[in-house]
Image (cartoon, helix red, strand yellow):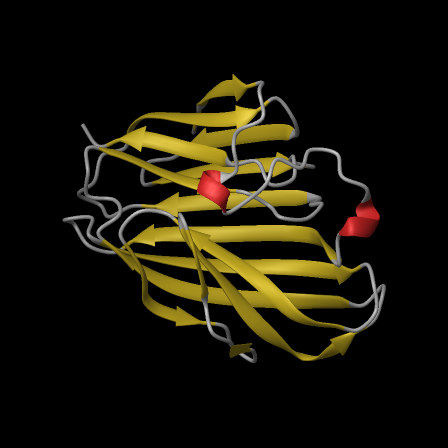
Amino acid sequence: MSPIQTKDNRTPQQGLGGLLSDTFNAPRDVFSYETVKFSGRLEILDRERRVARFVRHQRIRFLEDKVGVFMDRVWGEGVLFAGYAAPGLRMLEPIRTPKGYVVPLQLPRPFRQGDVFDLVTERRIIGAFYHPLAYWDTAMSAPTELISIEVIVPPSADIRRPEIVAPARGDMDATQRQRSLEFRVARPAVNIPYKLAWSWQ
């Protein structure tokens, strides 16, 4: 294992072209839920690096009553909806944004304050990671205790010069293994991207 270089981005970023807002320290009562733990696994499936799969597990705790819809924010490069699944949830009509989509997911029932729910989504991405410079970024739209992101690459791929570009907020840890990068941040800023970037050459 080897550490990954981290760059602090000390000024709030604009919210991904209108997809997100710059909300660093909003009061908790503006949110309908908080994230206890978010773990994402991005796996690049082919040696040409043209097809990838992202699976996310997110445990949320509701902060108000009668919450029946979860808004999944999807953005990035390539074809974002080559396939999308949210087991046990009904996907409503996606809402287009300047940088991607907001996907409303109907929850199995209205939840009450203090309830906990485990959300799983999976999507296939085409054409996002074959360029010489690649990245994956994550921004949490509610208070979050812990994020972990793992990037898995094919045996023929060679990850070089990985780095984290992130605001100076949250306890960060990142490592590189032979075929993977892993990034963790506790108590991240709200609505500010944390980017894991790397080169293939």
84 relative to 116 in the view: left or right: left
37 on left or right of 51? right
Residue 67 in the image: above or below residue 154: below
Q: Position of residue 7 (x, y in %)?
A: 48, 19
Q: Residue at x 19, y 54 (%)?
A: 46
Which of 4/20 is in front? 20
Q: Nearer the viewer, residue 4 or 109?
A: 109
Compared to residue 110, the image places residue 52 above or below, namely above
User: From what the image shows, is residue 90 above or below residue 58?
Assistant: below
Q: Quadrant of the C terminus?
A: top left
Quarter of the figure with residue 187: top right
Q: Residue at x 43, y 65 (%)?
A: 122
Tally of numbered tags: 0
Q: Position of residue 119 (x, y in %)?
A: 60, 66
Q: Position of residue 91 (x, y in %)?
A: 50, 76
**Could you tell whether 17 is left or right of 187 in the image?**
left
Q: Position of residue 125 (x, y in %)?
A: 30, 57
Quarter of the rendering containing residue 61: bottom right
The residue shown at (65%, 35%) is: 189
Instruction: Identify the image quadrant of the N terminus.
Output: top left
In this view, the residue farthest toward the left is: 48
Q: Residue at x 47, y 26 (%)?
A: 165
35 displayed left or right of 90:
right
